[in-house]
Image: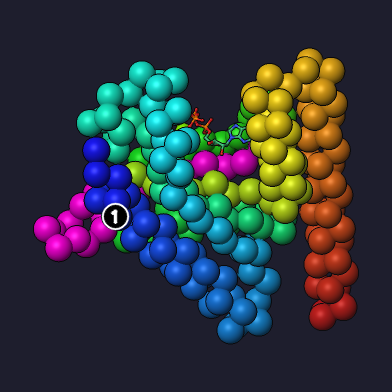
Amino acid sequence: MNWDMFLAPYNQAVDELKVKLRGMRAQYEYGSMHSPIEFVTGRVKPIKSILSKAKKKQTPHNHLEYEIQDIAGLRVVCQFVDDIYTVVDMLRRRKDFEIIEEKDYITKKKDSGYRSFHVIIEYPVETIHGEKMLLAEIQIRTLAMNFWATNEHSLNYKYSGQIPIDVQSRLKRASEAAFQLDEEMSKIRNEIQEAQAIFRH
Ligand code: GTP
Ligand code: MG
């Protein structure tokens, strides 16, 4: 398998999508508006991780591009939970890719305590051989959800995916604490906005 050749369009897609999503943030900044996007990161899945996922899902190597949806991965981090839905709405209206799946792990969190909104898109990359459609995963989450997921991910790694049950339940509680923080921040934000509206009138 020629990995460089296989991964080239994914690298291209991640680079392009980072520019495009960061451009959305920049437009809010030019307009001196609150940006629903705090920051954007992106990565191409390392070959080792592609192979271990393929093994787990029993995906033959000629099906990787269809069955592994997050070879190209983008992450949009927001300040507030409401911002996530603003971003999702903007993604739905874009004409440079098609959303093929949405997973709302915010209203329906995962058993681990994980929260995030996932959007799987079909993204066209221009290659020297013509247009190539590929799948990419965009994860949209708040700073608090990102904080939790980043730490949980690294702990999972340290425990080789076998987090002891007591640690699991503490992580679940930590995820609730992170979510309460999000809700409190939203309340504070709404109260400030209401106060400002009264002040203007
Ligand atoms: P995958 O086979 O992992 O892709 O599962 P899936 O196809 O059901 O996709 P899902 O939307 O559940 O998860 C995709 C990605 O979300 C993962 O690669 C992680 O980046 C992230 N994710 C999902 N669950 C968790 C979790 O419990 N903890 C953390 N830290 N990240 C998670
Ligand atoms: Mg997936």
Q: Residue at x 57, y 42 (%)?
A: 117
Crowding around mark 1 (Cα neighbors within 10 Å: few <14, some 14 to 19, many 20+) is some
Q: Residue at x 78, y 35 (%)?
A: 175
User: Residue beneath label 1, please?
Assistant: 9
Is 126 above or below relative to 166?
below
Check residue 131 for magenta coloring: yes
Start-end of magenta stretch: 115-134
Rendered-image quadrant of the C terminus: bottom right
Mark 1 residue CB less than 8 A from any atom of ligand 2: no
Q: Position of residue 153 (x, y in %)?
A: 67, 36
Residue 48 placed where, x, y %? Answer: 45, 36
Q: Residue 85: tell me if it is visible.
A: no
Residue at image position (84%, 74%) is 196
What secondary structure prevails in the magenta region? Answer: strand
Q: Quadrant of the N terminus?
A: top left
Residue 105: image location, x then y, percent: 61, 34
Residue farthest along the left direction in this orientation: 129
Magenta span has 22? no
Which x, y percent locates residue 120?
42, 42
